[in-house]
Image (cartoon, rainbow, N blue to C red):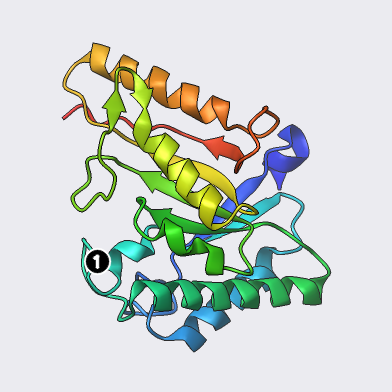
Amino acid sequence: RTLYAQYGIRVYVSDFAGLYADGAHAEPYANDEAAVRTHLQQLVELYGGEPWLLAWQLGNENNYYIKGGIFGEQISQSLPEYLQLMDRLAAAVRQAEQLQGVRHPIVLGHGGERGLELVGSLKYFDAVGLNLYPNLVGGAFQGGWDGGRAVYLEQVFATVQQAAPRLAVILAEVGQPHTTAAGQATYLHSALAVAQAHAAGGAATDNKVIAGSFVFDPS
């Protein structure tokens, strides 16, 4: 509250949607939809009326932990089932906000590009927040960085635009490993150029990038 009052800083609240244990749950509870819904409703009751609240994000790469997930199968659902689960949770957040007479954007925290062709089924999300690493095991897109042009990001934007033109895009993380400082600089320049071309307020007519950060992995 002090930061908002003095500097106008607002907070983007992210929740893991049961993927990990927390103060009220000794074990991960992502498969207990009722428990996750109750938890999210409590978050809205606690913070929904705060002037510093910017948006909600549900999940953080949770899709990496569904059936066939590259990091495990803690969530016992297929990708389409998982997306519908998250949409129901977003609906619960929206309903809880309506009871308070407030309205904030709801963002799906998604890892990688797999499954983006299905986000058109989402009804209650306003944006998709992406953590993108082109060289991650299981990546669907090929081509990566071509002559300084971020082909991978262009493909991601095109996929979301085709599947769900109404959804905004938030670049939460974008990473590309390089072993040299020059390689990192080339990556950053290319990624920023693509993000800027699709940024909100620009001339592009597709999904608008409304926020972003870039993560470096020099290994």
Q: Using the image as rendered, state which of residue 44 and residue 120 is in the foreground.
A: 120
Residue at the far right in the pictured view? 101
Residue at the far front in the pictured view? 162
Q: Please state if 212 lies on the left or on the right of 188 as rendered.
A: right
Going by the numbered disc 1, the residue's amino acid type is Gly
Q: Is residue 18 visible to us here?
A: no
Q: Where is residue 202 in the image (x, y as percent from the top left)?
A: 67, 28
Q: Please state if 107 lies on the left or on the right of 192 as rendered.
A: right
Q: Using the image as rendered, state which of residue 23 and residue 219 is in the foreground.
A: 219
Which residue is depicted at the point 26% across and 75% down? 67
Q: Is residue 54 above or below residue 44?
A: above
The answer to which quarter of the image holds residue 177 is top left
The answer to which quarter of the image holds residue 39 is bottom right
Q: Using the image as rendered, state which of residue 178 and residue 205 is in the foreground.
A: 205
Q: Is residue 14 visible to us here?
A: yes
- Report the label total: 1
Which residue is depicted at the point 40% across and 21% down? 190
Badge 1, how many Cα within 10 Å: few under 14, some, many 20+? some
Q: Position of residue 7 (x, y in %)?
A: 72, 33
Which residue is depicted at the point 59% across and 71% down? 90
Q: In this view, does 155 lie above or below 115?
A: above
- Circle 1 sits in a helix, a strand or a loop, which is it? loop
Q: Please state if 27 lies on the left or on the right of 23 as rendered.
A: left
Provide the residue designation for mark 1.
69
Q: Position of residue 71 (x, y in %)?
A: 21, 62
Q: Position of residue 219 (x, y in %)?
A: 15, 30
Which residue is depicted at the point 61% across and 63% down? 125
